[in-house]
Image (tube, rainbow, N blue to C red):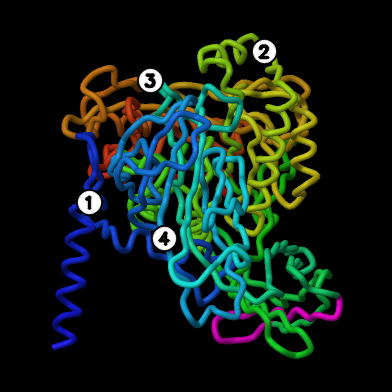
């Protein structure tokens, strides 16, 4: 009888939750939107590269309210919002604008499991756009600015018995502010999309000992067959010991111990190298001991791979992977969803675009002016695809049109001191956040003069901060002799422009293509759908794509070392994707596209 009552209670609870939530608006949805369980939203562990066995997911229905800036916590709320979907998204169940004059309030309660009693409790936010204040049991426990990086607070001192009250306040001015925002704009049009405000990645709790592991930085060196592991810890002393175990499946490759605060170079004999064709990952177990007593234990992983440049026999600088010439070729990937905006509806959806990119015959993705959740990069690591990581553009006091004019004027943007400081802070945080993911091969600080400033200084700082990767200083932007690449944009078809006296960097085609095909029943809007060129069916699109590919293969021999095709999917008013925005239709003849892509990639091997 008790079992039956429990089942009935669960059914009633689930039905009640669904009654409080449904996707808002009448815009298109992906197939994954239909599978969302509001009681189990994005249930996967959110940070696989530093994984603990015990955690608690706080995604789900929260109370929300939108109030004018400067108000106190509301006494009553407007309704329910599904976390972690931005308030402007359909899947939030709200789909309302925020704007610079308002703040978004969230509230929920949570309980701490009884077996966590002797632990410190960390409250994690995957990402919140943009300025965040967090309160636990009516005490402000911390704040954060930035829309793309994770942050956390140790909330242990503020917990009481029973239910814990959690309140979050967010302010996000989008393009009325100076902060990094990517393609978000308050009045979406053309290549500029709907704002994303508030919580847009998983919120979760994690129990740790007072002495615990805070971060892991893995740096491979295939030339010496060594892996440097740097483990950051909290509340430890030099007497505490860290143990790192490297495994190849069930086989232990190496086991090393070192004092907290130190790093260690681990020998990896006969190292198996990571590449898109063979994405081998070593498993890591990392333990923290205090006088022989285990304090913390995490699982991680690492790869042995190297990205570099080298002149070929003709004096052309080529990109290299693992000391061999390697042509990087992939789509411009915006990472937007019609129902979730910045947030994929499910983990299956998140991995889908990466798998299709591999199916299309590419070996690289350029993540365009957006940063993804940690699981996206882990999927890239495991599936095997290189990533060019953009810094999201900002300095939004100027319109996108003004920024484009500055591109054609050939001038850098003047930033205010606060805008420059915000850029530097968030770019460093992004690089810190993503440092250990082996799929990331290239950092891209600027795109097309969108907020571009002090290019040489920023590029040199980026290279110094992470010398293990390549730096593309300004993709299609104002060009300065700095970084590892000269990046040219040319639409619609590929074209090679040779710049005089720039023989020490690789020349890459950072964007081309944009072949449009509007498919009825899969459009964000009924008119003003946009592509650089437009065709009527998949055959026509593929014919044009193959024509571009044949020309690109010819230009590879002349000097191109990488190329980026625009783009993975349609996005809002853009219809130049390889797939529709809802991912329900492939808009090209897949076999023909894969064949020409492989021909382009293999040109250097001929």
* Tag in front: 4 or 2: 4
- Circle 2 packing at 10 Å, graded few (<14), some (14-19), many (20+), is few
Q: Position of residue 422 (x, y in %)?
A: 68, 34
Q: Earlier in the sequence, mark 4 or mark 1?
A: 1
* Tag in front: 4 or 1: 4
Mark 4 and mark 2 in contact? Answer it, CB < 8 Å: no
Mark 3 and mark 2 in contact? Answer it, CB < 8 Å: no
Q: Could you tell me how far apart the alpha carbons at marks 1 and 2 are, in whole angstroms?
A: 52 Å
Q: Could you tell me how far apart the alpha carbons at marks 3 and 2 are, in whole angstroms?
A: 24 Å
Q: Earlier in the sequence, mark 3 or mark 2?
A: 3
Q: Which residues are magenta?
A: 238-253
Q: Residue at x 51, y 35 (%)?
A: 171
* Tag in front: 4 or 3: 4
- Tag on residue 483? none
- Reading the image, the residue beneath label 2 is 410
- Reading the image, the residue beneath label 3 is 189
Q: Earlier in the sequence, mark 1 or mark 3?
A: 1
Q: Could you tell me how far apart the alpha carbons at marks 4 and 1 are, in whole angstroms?
A: 17 Å
- Left or right placement of residue 321 versus residue 226 in this view: left
Query: In this rendering, is residue 442 above or below 433?
Result: above
- Reading the image, the residue beneath label 1 is 20
Image quadrant containing the N terminus: bottom left
- Left or right placement of residue 94 versus residue 192 in this view: left
Query: In this rendering, is residue 178 above or below 161?
Result: above
Q: Position of residue 192 (x, y in %)?
A: 43, 25
Q: Could you tell me how far apart the alpha carbons at marks 4 and 3 are, in whole angstroms?
A: 39 Å
Q: Could you tell me how far apart the alpha carbons at marks 4 and 2 are, in whole angstroms?
A: 53 Å
């Amino acid at each position: 009888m008790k079992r039956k009552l429990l089942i009935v209670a669960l059914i009633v609870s689930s039905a009640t939750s669904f009654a409080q939530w449904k996707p808002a608006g009448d815009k298109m949805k992906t197939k994954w939107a239909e599978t969302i369980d509001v009681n189990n939203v994005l249930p996967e562990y959110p940070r696989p590269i530093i994984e603990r066995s015990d955690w608690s997911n706080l995604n789900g229905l929260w109370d929300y309210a939108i109030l004018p800036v400067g108000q106190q916590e509301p006494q009553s709320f407007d309704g329910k919002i599904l976390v972690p979907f931005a308030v402007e998204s359909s899947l939030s169940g709200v789909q309302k604008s925020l704007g610079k004059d308002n703040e978004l309030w969230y509230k929920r309660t949570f309980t701490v499991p009884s077996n966590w009693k002797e632990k410190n409790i960390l409250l994690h936010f995957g990402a919140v756009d943009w300025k965040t204040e967090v309160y636990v049991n009516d005490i402000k426990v911390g704040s954060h600015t930035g829309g793309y990086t994770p942050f956390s607070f140790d909330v242990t001192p503020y917990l009481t018995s029973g239910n814990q009250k959690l309140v979050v306040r967010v302010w996000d001015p989008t393009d009325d502010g100076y902060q990094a925002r990517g393609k978000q704009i308050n009045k979406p049009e053309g290549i500029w999309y709907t704002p994303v405000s508030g919580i847009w990645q998983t919120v979760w709790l994690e129990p740790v000992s007072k002495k615990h592991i805070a971060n892991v930085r893995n740096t491979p060196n295939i030339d010496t067959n060594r892996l440097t592991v740097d483990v950051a810890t909290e509340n430890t002393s030099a007497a505490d010991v860290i143990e790192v175990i490297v495994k190849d499946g069930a086989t232990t490759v190496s086991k090393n111990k070192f004092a907290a605060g130190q790093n260690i170079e681990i020998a990896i004999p006969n190292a198996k190298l990571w590449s898109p064709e063979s994405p081998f990952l070593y498993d890591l177990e990392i333990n923290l001991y205090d006088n022989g007593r285990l304090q913390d234990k995490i699982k991680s992983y690492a790869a042995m791979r190297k990205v570099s440049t080298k002149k070929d026999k003709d004096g052309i600088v080529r990109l290299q992977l693992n000391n061999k010439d390697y042509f990087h070729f992939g789509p411009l990937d915006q990472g937007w969803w019609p129902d979730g905006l910045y947030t994929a509806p499910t983990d299956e959806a998140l991995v889908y675009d990466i798998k299709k990119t591999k199916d299309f015959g590419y070996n690289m993705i350029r993540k365009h002016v957006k940063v993804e959740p940690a699981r996206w990069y882990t999927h890239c690591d495991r599936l095997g695809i290189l990533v060019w990581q953009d810094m999201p553009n900002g300095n939004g006091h100027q319109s996108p049109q003004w920024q484009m004019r500055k591109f054609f004027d050939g001038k850098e943007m003047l930033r205010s001191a606060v805008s420059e400081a915000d850029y530097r802070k968030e770019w460093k945080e992004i690089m810190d956040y993503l440092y250990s993911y082996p799929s990331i091969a290239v950092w891209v600080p600027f795109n097309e003069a969108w907020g571009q400033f002090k290019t040489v200084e920023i590029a040199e700082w980026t290279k110094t901060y992470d010398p293990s990767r390549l730096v593309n200083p300004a993709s299609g932007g104002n060009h300065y002799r700095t970084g590892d690449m000269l990046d040219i944009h040319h639409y619609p078809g590929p074209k090679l422009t040779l710049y005089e006296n720039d023989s020490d960097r690789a020349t890459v085609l950072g964007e081309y293509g944009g072949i449009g095909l509007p498919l009825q029943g899969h459009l964000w809007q009924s008119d003003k759908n946009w592509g650089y060129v437009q065709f009527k069916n998949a055959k026509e699109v593929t014919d044009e794509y193959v024509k571009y590919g044949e020309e690109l293969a010819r230009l590879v021999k002349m000097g191109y070392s990488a190329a980026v095709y625009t783009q993975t999917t349609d996005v809002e008013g853009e219809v130049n994707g390889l797939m529709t925005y809802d991912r329900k239709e492939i808009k090209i003849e897949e076999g023909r596209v894969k064949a020409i892509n492989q021909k382009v990639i293999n040109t250097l091997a001929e």
